[in-house]
Each structure stands twice: as structure tokens, then as C-alpha cells.
Image (cartoon, helix red, strand yellow):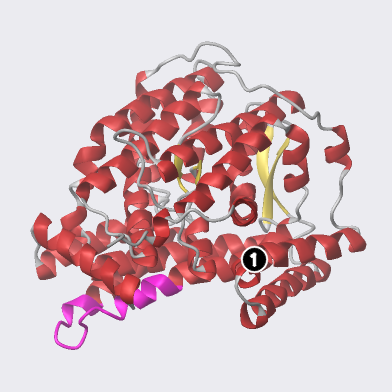
Amino acid sequence: MTQAIHPVDQMLPWPRLATLGLQHVLVMYAGAVAVPLIIGRALKLSPEDVAFLISADLFACGIATLIQSLGAPGLGIRLPVMMGVTFAAVGPMLSMATAPEIGLLGIYGSVIAAGAFGMVVAPFVSRLLPLFPPVVTGTIILVIGISLMRVGINWAGGGLPTLTKVVDGVPGAFPNPNYAQLEGLGLALFVLLAILALTKWGRGFVANVAVLLGIVAGCGLATVLGIMHFEKVAAAPWFGLVLPFHFGTPSFHLVPVLTMCLVMIVVMIESLGMFLALADMTGRRIDRAALTAGLRADGAGTLIGGIFNTFPYTSFSQNVGLVGVTGVRSRYVTAMGGLIMLALGLMPKMAAIVEAVPLVVLGGAGLVMFGMVAATGARILAQVDFRTNRFNLYIVALSVGFGMIPLVAPNFFKNLPHALHPLLESGILLAALVAVALNAFFNGVRSAEAAEREVAAAAAAVEHG
């Protein structure tokens, strides 16, 4: 009897792959280019160098995504994962950027060292699987979704409510004049309604690409309203080569290297939650070896990022929601997204077209996708025994509470040592640490074999449910 191909390993027709892959790229593009823009401006690089940072970022995104989705010897989770630059590293990198003795080359040295460190410690991080029963994974995924909703809401509003500008050499926060304009809010609502209509009345492939079609419809309306502009598209060149060490030989400094290694641990713990969420969504059983390969790919992506003039990489949580929305579980879809990112990195004009998509258009789509991540966490928690085990209620309640601190009170930990801020500024990491600690305290720690059986049972439930 011929063994059935798992949906994760299913190769779709090329036109469908390209369309679904483009949908993934549009979802994560704004987040992917944000970090190079922030760091480039902090370093006062020329517009040409900032444009190169973005191209290098897209190029390295593509390579890292291909490794994570398709796999290589000892690397890659082989699930539908898109890779992008992590925001967890922005704070430390901004501190490095303002230090004259470190600068951009010092940042690249710390990124390269952190990538190598991540590859080495991946097997040890993957051993944490027994600490993640459903009550923990469900809580973490719920917090991931809630945290992402802030991103989607700000996209719908047209960006952040306040913008950081440098006046007379001093950075300061100023209100964003374009935030929450009625025209932008209406456009985000239009995209949201278009996606909902296509999801309800669309069939087959149309329903699968409802997010992409909603974004395209939003772009059309934005162009008519004069919100979407194409001047940068006309000015961008057709081809640009991305070479390693474009800015020079990286330098290595002890404190920045140690700081970035700490960020790498944060990234890997967040990725662990992301992998478990995708395993639940796709019905693919993942064991400790698979988790090790996935976490090692995070390290490899970060190492590649440092070599190709960009920054630390992680599995992008934005795209997890898209898997839930579309129901398409093939890892070849995100691999196609990786190829598109590679092409965008080498073709600045095409990248400029994608960059021209207004944030408010993406906001309408973000509300759908990020909410789906939170809903996945709620679905996992629905399988948890709250009736006879009242301790599980405490685990969820306190973990979600701690996870909300960085979102609702960003200055809550401002008086604690600065070295701890990379740990305390991630609501996802806080929720994970509290959930793991409380579960170990109340329920004890399972054996590795029991943990793998539980993951396998959850995968089977999705596959046959």
C-alpha cells in the first residue's frame, strides 16, 4: 500500500505555490524591513546604505527560510516557517550603534557569534520539551497571538502612535500625525471585510488566498485614494548584488557578544513555542531531534545574517496565523516565500513595489491572522483539565498576566538592571518562563518520553480531527 503524503510534505502546483508564497511574503514584509530601517537610521547611514541593508535583509531572509522549511543535514524544522529579523535584538543593537567603539561592524560581530552560539546550544534548548505540556504551550501561543494583535492594530492605525525623531542631536518621541486617520481606518476595515467575505463565500483556492486577495483589493483602493505611491518604485534599480561583509570585516567585543547570545536564548525559547504551535496546526509530530534541527536553523540563519550584513533571525510568528487562516500546511509554500524573498533582495525595484503597500492595508489582514494565533492557543487550552485540576487555572491566569506587562506597561521594569531588559521586554518569554515554572511547581515535570507521546497524540488529533 502506498503511504499517504502528509499535508506538510505535499508539493502543490507551481502557480498555486507562487500565489500562496507571495501571500506569506506580504504578511511578514513590513516586519522584515523594520529592523534594518531602525538600525540604519540610528547609525545615520546614507539612504543608499539603508536601501542595501533592506536588500541584504530580504536576501538573508530567503536563505534562512529555505533552510528552515526544506531542511539541510542537521538543520531545519521542516514545517511551514518564514524567517525574519527578530525585534528582540533591536534594543541591544541600538545601544551598540551609539557606542563609537562598536558601531555597525561590532553589531555584525556579535550577530555572527550569537549565531554560532545558537547552533551549539540548540540540543540543550530542545531538551526543554518535557516542560511544555498543553497547559503551557496553549498559554504561550495565546500570549503570542495577543502580543501580535498590538502589531496588527497599529498597522491598521497607520504605524506607531508616536514616532522617534532626532532633534538637535537628541532623540525624542512625537505624535504620529497619520495615526488613526479615518481614511486609513476605513481602508483597513475594507480589507478586513473583503477577507471575511472571501473566506465565507470563496471556494477552494480562492478561500486559501483570501488574505492576499484582500490585500490586493486594499492596494487598488489605496491607489485610487492616493494613499499608495510608486515614486520609490520608479527610482529603484532593477538589480543589486548582495555580497558578504559589504561594510567591512566584523569586529568582536565581549559585552556585545554576551548580550547578543542572551538575545539568542530568548529567540530560541520563543521559537520553541512557535514550533509547537505549528505542530499543533499542521498535525505533524515533532520530537526532540526535530526541535533541535529547527532551533539550530535559527542559529544558522543568524550566522548567515551576520555574514550578509544583516541581523539575528527567528521564526516569524506573523506567518503562523496565516497557516491557521488558510488551512494550507505545505512547507513548500513557505519555501516558495523564501525564494520570493531572495528575488526581492536581488531586485530592489520589485522590493519597492511590495514596500509601497500601505500599513493600513496590512492592518486589516493582521487582525485576522494574529487573532487566529490566539484562537489556536485557546483551542489547545480547551483540551486542558481545568475541572479536576484547579492548579491549571492559576498557571494560565498568572502566565497571561505576566505576558501582558510589556504590552500594557512598557516601563514596568525600568528600574531593574539594564542587562535584564532583553529578558523582561518580551511578553512571550515572560509568559513562557512563568508558565513553565508554575507548571513544574504545581504539576511536576513529565518524562521526555511522555512529552513526545503527548505531542504525537496532539498531532494525530489534528490530522484525523
Q: Is 384 drawn above or below residue 354 in the view shown?
A: below
- Check disc 1: other Cα within 10 Å, few if <14, some if 14-19, many if 20+: many
Name the residue at 59% across, 51% down.
28
Judge from the rendering whether residue 171 lies leftward or rightward of residue 334; answer left or right.
right
- Is 378 included in the stretch rendered in magenta? yes
| Magenta stretch in the rendered image | 375-393
Residue 104 at what x, y percent from top left?
Answer: 55, 22
Q: Is 333 drawn above or below residue 241 in the view shown?
A: below
Judge from the rendering whether residue 171 lies leftward or rightward of residue 75; answer left or right.
right
Q: Is 182 drawn above or below residue 36 in the view shown?
A: below
Q: What residue did someone put label 1 on?
A: 211
Outermost residue, bottom direction?
A: 387
Judge from the rendering whether residue 423 lies leftward or rightward of residue 171; answer left or right.
left
Quadrant of the rendered image containing residue 353: top right
What secondary structure is marked by label 1? helix
Residue 368 at what x, y percent from top left?
Answer: 58, 71
Residue 438 at what x, y percent from top left?
Answer: 19, 65
Residue 68 at what x, y percent from top left?
Answer: 41, 42
Quadrant in which the N terminus is drawn: bottom left
- Is 39 included in the stretch rendered in magenta? no
Callout 1, which amino acid? Val
Nearer to the camera, 323 or 373: 323
Name the residue at 58% across, 59% down.
151
